[in-house]
Amino acid sequence: MKTIRTLFGSAALGLALGVTPIAGMAETPANMLVIANRIDDITTLDPAQSFEFAGADVIRNIYGKLVNFDPANLDAGYQPDLAESWTVSEDGRTITFTMREGVTFQSGNPVRAEDAAFSLKRAVILNKTPSFIITQFGFTPENVDETITVDGNTLSITTDKRYATSFVLNCLTATIGSILDEKTVMANEVDGDMGNQWLATNSAGSGPFTLASWKPKESVTLTANPGFYGGEPAMKRVIVRHVQESATQRLMLERGDVDVARDLTPSDVEGMEGVEGVEVVREMRGRLMYVSFNQKHPELSKPQVRQALKYLIDYEGMENSFLKNWYVGHQNFLPKTYLGSVDENPFSLDIEKAKALLAEAGVEGMELTVGVREAQERLEIAQSLQNTFAQAGITLNLEVGTGKQILGKYRARELDIYLGAWGPDYPDPHTNAGTFAYNPDNSDEAQATGLLAWRNSWDTGGLTEKVAAAVVEGDTEKRAEMYHDIQAQFRETAPFAVMFQLIEQAGVAEEVEGLSLGAAITAASYWNVTK
Amino acid sequence: MANFATETERRPWLPLPPWARGTLVTLSSIAVTMLGLLFVTFLIGRVMPIDPVLAIVGERATEEQYNAAYRELGLDRSLAVQFFYYVSDVLRGDFGTSLLTARDVSSDIARVFPATFELATIGILFGCILGVPLGVIAAVRRGSWIDQIARVIALVGYSMPIFWLGLMGLLLFYGILGWVGGPGRQGIFYEDMIPSVTGMILIDSLIAGDWGAFRDAFSHIVLPASLLGYYSLAYISRMTRSFMLEQLSAEYITTARVKGMSEWAVIWSHAFRNIRVQLITVIALSYANLLEGSVLTEIIFAWPGIGSYITTALLSADMNAVLGGTVVVGLVFICLNIFSDLLYKVFDPRSK
């Protein structure tokens, strides 16, 4: 009875403080990794089509690429994977990869240069959303047979012009650069879909794991590939369970039913501090939180108004309160750890300065609408903006909706202000420079909906040309310098106020070692995990 | 003349035996109801300010990719044509492919509905087994401490948010006491181990003869089912109490007591016997509500049921999934109505 009373007391105290201590009472098997994660964003596991976070985690562990990141040393940048080495032609347009010998797919078929060529050509021909990562180099369905060629054990790709080699190779580390088993995929082709339907729920890779099952919104199960050229992973099975609620994830971790909990809210992380057997891993992710101002709005298009609004954001207040340990202040479009990233954050809340700038622009009070999707942190940010904008006489109305609702209006250039997040598509500075500060045709007819600058009707004031120049610069140091300059001008003139960069906080059982969540540049890797 | 008129009125409008006519009427009403349900859901889905194309192509898609997906979904056709094609596909048993899972909607539903079905069935059993006696006792002992307890139980059931109660239940029974399994339908040891026959893991594990898997599945279902059952219990017990009070104040009960019948016989053989028909409606409606899926319970307990399936689909404008789910929920309601009608005939001689 006393025990029961003590337990109830503990629960009640825990509820009040949000820090209920729960001793680990179960353990997952030593050769199995169990992860609690939100995986309901997975809509397909075809590397040519998948473009979601949870899907990228799965695919990274199933497929090899020509070049890839070593989870043990992400800072080293891209490394040889299925391509053992590469050379670049004198004109800088052709890269020739020599394939690694003796590697096989999970089916037992050998990995050939033909498979690599097939995978890249397939991505171009299918033309799904992430295809731009490859097609931006000038590959088209019409020219792939000439631009992506095989000669024995080598694969050559020829781009439409000279690009920085690092840019091309960084793009090949993206999910879409996964190398598929051509024979297996084409054996499952339906109506000329190049295996698109089959690959949505099956795998044909050479990576450390094979897809055993994907049950939408329920779980993904991977089994170790004994023939993996890097050695069979210690974890024979990886189960990623869809657990929506942070509190539930935390309970499962503390009970020992999962090894990793990936979607913990700051309050749950705080509650876990000091819990025996569990530690918190923090990694900077690439996602940026920003607000942008539509340049079609007559007042928002004034430079002083744009500046004023940037001084009407309580960056520090938010970072130290509801975003604490969740987001860190960052006012540049390149995430920290990216080539060319800078740490300069010149804006802070300054109501008087904002008022002066608004007066200079001849603006005396106005009413604006911000589009925001119904996610907790975004709504809180929007409310903070509402409060600080009001102090300068600006009424900010919130238009709250689902991601799809708000995004539709944003893409149609219909919002005054958009509050949202942006994550890089591949680990190269051009991924963000090419959308935040690049807009070659600002007309409505251009319909460049993929470019954030276009969505905000911003002509970039000369940054488009600078971005185009940076992406072809071969000298890495010089290239980084160019991005420094671009971001300096961007901070001052752009209708974007980049505010924060995401920190991922995962709860991990202390016996788990070697887990990489991918930081800002790639997805999670499970093959180095030991317990 | 008068006789002729009477004979004309009595002539059946279809020259079929009564049972066949009854079946035909029922089937026609089901078809009309389903068509109406589909039409309304379809219309709501199409006028909602959510772009289904974006759900497939994502934020980064170019206009060309967007337009290709738009055409692929058939959205360039008129609403009437879209609806016509959809209904013809459904009549052929093809609910289309879900945008969010890249699978046939029918195979998705075959996966998520059994999960909800077994959860709801255990939940309603829990609600009936405890709720009915509690309501009867509360009525018989009106104003007593047991009536007050029943009232509090019902009040808590009505007013407590299910997500809060769910989290507290998890914290106590799973997190602290370790009496029940955690979120999800099975423990990791049994993941993908039991061949799916019915989709209901309790039944499938019995078919496979795996008692360990059965115990594991039961330990996972018991908490969410009890939670759902508790909410049914609250409703069923209050309704039972109210029906019983009405019967207990009737003259035939006083007569029975005056005749010297035992209290047990008065309550169960007379009063309760007369509320069975009303109670069937209440229980059937509760069961139907549970079979619709309880989104919050499913989220908290990571239970892949039809409630969260339809909700997620709706928020992403995955209309094939929404419509498929709606058909299933509609059929559930219709089947339960038919089942209630059959039970009426068994319990109420007048309806024969």
Image (tube, coloured by chain):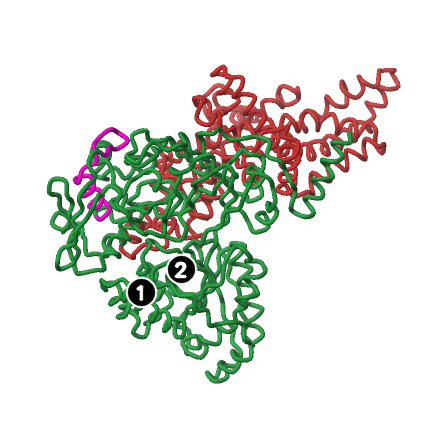
Chain colours: A green, B red
Q: Does B19 sit above or below residue A456?
A: above
Kind of residue indicated by mark 2? Pro
Quadrant occupied by the N terminus of chain A: top right
Asked whether A459 falls inside the magenta stretch, the response is no
* Camera-nearest residue between A494 and A234: A234
* Camera-nearest residue between A129 and A337: A337
How busy is the neighbourhood of tag 2: few (under 14 within 10 Å), some, or many (20 plus)? many
Residue drawn 49% across and 65% down? A370
User: Badge 2 sits on which subunit?
Assistant: A
Where in the figure is residue A431, as x and y percent of width and height?
Answer: 32, 58
Residue drawn 50% across and 84% down? A359
Q: Which residues are magenta?
A: A103-124
User: Badge 1 sits on which subunit?
Assistant: A
Q: Quadrant of residue A341?
A: bottom left
Question: At numbered mark 2, what does the secondary structure look like: helix, strand or loop?
Answer: loop
* Camera-nearest residue between B344 and B207: B207
Q: Which residue is mark 2?
A: A335
Lateral position of residue B2 relative to residue A421, left or right = right
Residue drawn 64% across and 34% down? B227
Residue drawn 87% across and 16% down? B259
Q: Does B4 sit above or below residue A418?
A: above
Q: Earlier in the sequence, mark 2 or mark 1?
A: 2
Q: Quadrant of residue A237?
A: top left
Disc assigned to residue A480: 1
Q: Please determine if labels 2 and 1 lie on a single subunit.
A: yes
Lateral position of residue A300 relative to residue A48, left or right = right
Kind of residue indicated by mark 1? Ala
